[in-house]
Image (cartoon, grey):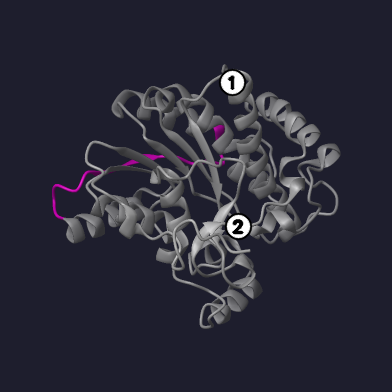
Amino acid sequence: MADTTFGPRGWTPERLGDLSGKTYLITGANAGAGFQAARTLLKKNAKVVMLNRSVEKSEAAIVDLKQEFGAKADVSFILLDLSALDSVRRAADEVLKTVPRIDALINNAAIAQVPSRNLTVDGFESQLGTNHYGHFLLNGLLFDRIAESKGRIVVVASLGYNMGLKTIKFDDMNWEEGYGANTAYSQSKLAQMMFAYELQDRLAAAGRHDVGVFTCHPGSSATSLITTSGSRTMRIIWWLMTKTPLVQTAEQGSYPEVMCATESALTEQRALYGPTGRMETVGPVGKGTLNPHAYDKTVMARLWDESEAATEFQWKL
């Protein structure tokens, strides 16, 4: 049954009040849904810090945003390559030096459908390394600053978590055997969701209520995700799909992450927010279907331990 919390049209940015004094960090914010989220937040006078891997694209995005919202628009950029843990550490250091408060960290960046198996500089399969490990470390390093502001962590997942193995392949997380672009992507997005739900459990166990952790997905949105990292065939198929009603705009795809970062009426954290229309890929934004394999406790807890070991970072809650 569709979620009607926010009425028949679902959640839209019309619900946003003035966000002056609030600061939002967004990974992968120079294009697609991340860029659209930045636009929406800047429109409401928030400060936005973009964490991106391309200097050139980030500078161009800032020019575009200042043209739209004026020279005083508070938008800046910190270099972050999620596929390199050293880059994550440097970016977090820069954030802690220059950003005094974080109202939400929106984990938006991702790579998808990488056609052949690649490893990151740290030796991880590229999609798992970028989408999960990079964000796992970033959130850990910035957690205390988020907690000081009673802020939120927003994980932008994907309906892809329902595909592939629907679990974590602990005996071969880097896909030395049986690599498939979609199965590896699905594992990486499931890992991100499990990070969020396990973090919820750990915060509850520690009696902490100072950070909200929310998970969402953009549905089928016309972002640059597939065109950036997918194979030529996938790019052609995706381009054709964007011409149909099965795909919504990048702006619509950004609504769930903005909602999860800002909406005070959002209280249920063990949930997956996103479009609630056709196959939950398009339509009004609200609470969607969350399948139990995404919060399998045994798998989540083990993944957390494996992630701490892989990133050489111990969370202290």
Find residue 307 and report its image quarter: top right
Question: What residue span does the magenta drawing correspond to?
Answer: 70-85
Residue 125 magenta-highlighted: no
Which residue is most to the left?
71
Q: Which residue is mark 1?
A: 315
Q: Which residue is mark 2?
A: 288
Going 55% across and 42% down the picture, which residue do you hit? 268
Report the side of 131 relative to 109 (left or right).
right
| Separation of marks 2 and 1 at Cα, in angstroms | 30 Å
Give SS at disc 2: loop
Report the side of 178 relative to 114 (left or right).
right
Task: Evaluate whether residue 205 shows in this view.
Answer: yes
Name the foreground residue: 183 vs 304. 304
Q: Taking 316 as reference, is 299 above or below it?
A: below
Going 54% across and 70% down the picture, which residue do you hit? 282
Give SS at disc 1: loop
Question: Residue 46: percent from the left, percent from the top?
Answer: 26, 44
Task: Evaluate whether residue 121 shows in this view.
Answer: no
Q: Check whether the beta carbons of the residues at disc 2 and disc 1 lie within 8 A of each other.
A: no
Quarter of the image with the C terminus is top right
Crowd tier of the residue under label 2, counting other residues whose Cα lies within 10 Å: few below 14, some 14–19, many 20 or above: many
Callout 1 amino acid: Trp
Question: Residue 234: percent from the left, percent from the top?
Answer: 64, 71
Residue 81 magenta-highlighted: yes
